[in-house]
Image (cartoon, rainbow, N blue to C red):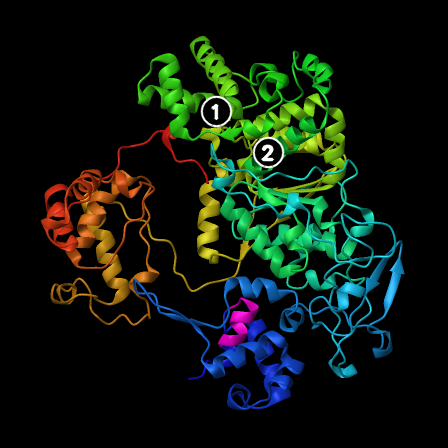
Amino acid sequence: SLIPLCEILGEILQAGPDTKGVVSRYEELLGRLGPELWILEHAPLEQIARHGGQLLAEAIRRMRSGQVIRQAGFDGQYGVIRLFTDEELRNHRSDNRLLCQAFPLPEQDSPAQMGTSRVRGNTAHVEPSSSLCPPGDRFATGTAERELGSSERVGAPPLFSVELGGEGRGGSPGQAVPPPSFAAQREGPGDLACGANRPEGTARSASGPSASAKLLFPPSGEWLLAGLDPEQRAAVQCVEGPVLILAGPGTGKTRTLTHRIAYLVAEHGVPPEGCLAITFSRRAAAEMRSRLERLIPAVAERMPVMTFHAFGWQLVREYGQRLSASAGQKSFSSGEEGLSGGQEGFPGGQAAIAVPLSERFGTNWDRFCVASEAQRRELLQRLLNLSAIQADRILKKISLAKRSSEGAPKDSKLQEAFRVYQGEMARRGWLDFDDLVLLPLEILRADSAWQAELQQRFRYLSVDEFQDIDGAQYGLLRTLAPPGGNLCVIGDPDQAIYGFRGADVGFFERFLADYPTARRFVLRRNYRSSRVIVEAAGQMIAPASWTPNRRLEAEPGKIPHVEIHTCPTDRAEAELVVHRIEQLLGGPTFFSLDSRRSEGQQDSGRSFSDIAVLYRTESQAGPLVEALARSGMPFQVCSHRPLVEWPGVQKLLQELSSQTDSAGPLSERVRRLLEAFCPTEYVPAPEQGPDDRPEQT
């Protein structure tokens, strides 16, 4: 069997088979090699490799020999046939000619200039004769070339720099520079959990990455600006000094930020290790890293892209290594004295928050671990003789106090709990997630030499979702970026929804005050929603908008005007929702047709998966679930509540663990227990206040 060429190209390019880039490559290959069936069945692999790259040739070889990866479908999802694993694609991405063509570079002046090397400073710029070279050949020596016709040569960025003299980070001249340990580490729960094995890190030099170890690109980064709108392009090209980017919903916030980082490396020769990108969730960090891998695949691994907490954990571990390498704790003497007074940005002073550094670290820095919520709750229960609910409430108040810029709780009773909690946590070598920001902040303010070292190492800082920042996080940014530093923050003050956990939209104004030379850019073009949705939402938030006279532009769409209905009861509202869905789908059931709730003439091509029902709180879900179930429509309810918290589930698990195999087949036992313990009607979760909402992960 054959796989369509567009699907093969889509897998290689990590894009849909109908996207512009894939279709362009498809048409180019047909023009060079001939009809699609000929390419798939008969074209010599050497010819395919010459015109399409080794990865495409290997894909077609595997297809012809039946060496495919079959992923079965599930829950209404179609099965997938693949030719490469994700790991294979990552390993080959930097050698793939198609990927380089998808982001074309300026061509050289003449074929004679291709494959030559130019010297700038003390580093050789290797300009390959093609974008497809066997790994290790061209970049191991800086001179080897793949022999191709001059008409087929396409310029591409070199994967590594080649040093002309001196020693790199553990390598000899002419060798590819490996990624640094700091940038290569990936944050994860296993790295922070108490009792987890933590690998030894590598101390960094005070001077940061070697200047001669910069990755070098062709002299133009214009290819990174292609496809950006004028506002995005202006923000990307502003690379010096502090930058504030106000990005409304759907305006390409992450796209702008990642292109700006890639532009710094490709156009201005900034070392990848010097571009620190910080965001607020592991998922957002993974998405940013994935985009950078597509833009500059050769060096994305060398860029530190992580959350605030992961970055703080790295700093704590690195500083502990510095202490272990030094003899004694003399570096603390002057720093601890300076902590007794108020700190800039923290009127209450940080001394109230953190136990003195010498007591926190001692000589056993590696004993630190991040305590789980359950461990901290149990600790507080035992220390203060509290119930689990009381301990949870105090922990949330302590966390809010740490995240704010006040420094410590104001309530006298909470202050005592705070003091006992912090002291016992320090004695055990435990940290909570707020300490991962506060402790590095305290260390940097106490150790000006290390602060200067980090400022030199991370000369370019980029912060995503700036509207979610709290006082401690802003203080950490201030210590890393001086007033004229290269700090770029991007966010939307009108999307600030985490005030209940310490986030403060006022830091947008604070940023402009602390960085008076900051350039300000506004992204106005919405690419996510239709004009009707954008204008309606803009009218609703206009009275409370942080940006006066805010205006978002969107493309015209075919969506009609927003309809507003008022219903007397929640059940009437649920019935209205069901009736509207039936109208949209043209009568999905015989009942809707027989009862004339729908005329059955709607032919919009919509399906159940195209429709979503949104509600503000989970308590409103009951009538909606009941009405949808009665209508016979397939649906699923999304909830933050873990499965084990649903009524009857915990009892079901206990019964299953206590029963033996003699009680009958597992399916029959589960059925009986479900009927006995789990209600069939929807039971909403208890209402949650602001302090009970789930953490952003």
Q: In the image, 608: left or right of 651?
A: right
**Residue 349 visible within the image:** no
| Above or below, 371 relative to 492 | above
Tell me if residue 525 comes above or below residue 586 in the rendering: above
Give the image location of residue 587, x and y in percent. 21, 66
- Residue 11 belongs to magenta span: yes
Image coordinates for residue 412, horizontal then vertical, percent: 46, 8
Residue at 65 percent across and 60 percent down: it is 297
User: Label 2, on which residue?
Assistant: 312
User: In the image, 239: left or right of 597?
Assistant: right
200, 471: nearer the viewer: 200
Of marks 1 and 2, the one in the foreground: 2
Per the image, the residue denoted by label 1 is 400
Where is the N terminus found, in terms of image quarters?
bottom left
Say whether residue 513 is left or right of residue 352.
right
Q: Is residue 292 above or below residue 195?
A: below
What type is the residue that disc 1 sits on?
Leu
Among the two numbered marks 1 and 2 on one chain, the one whose residue lies closer to the N terminus:
2
Q: Are marks 1 and 2 in contact (CB under 8 Å)?
A: no
* Percent position of residue 166, x then y: 86, 50
The residue lying toward the viewer, choosing from 375 and 681, is 375
Q: Residue 303 versus residue 323: which sits nearer the camera? A: 323
Q: Report crowding for label 2: few under 14, some 14 to 19, many 20 or more residues within 10 A (C-alpha).
A: many
SS at mark 1 in the image: helix
Q: Magenta span covers which residues?
A: 7-15
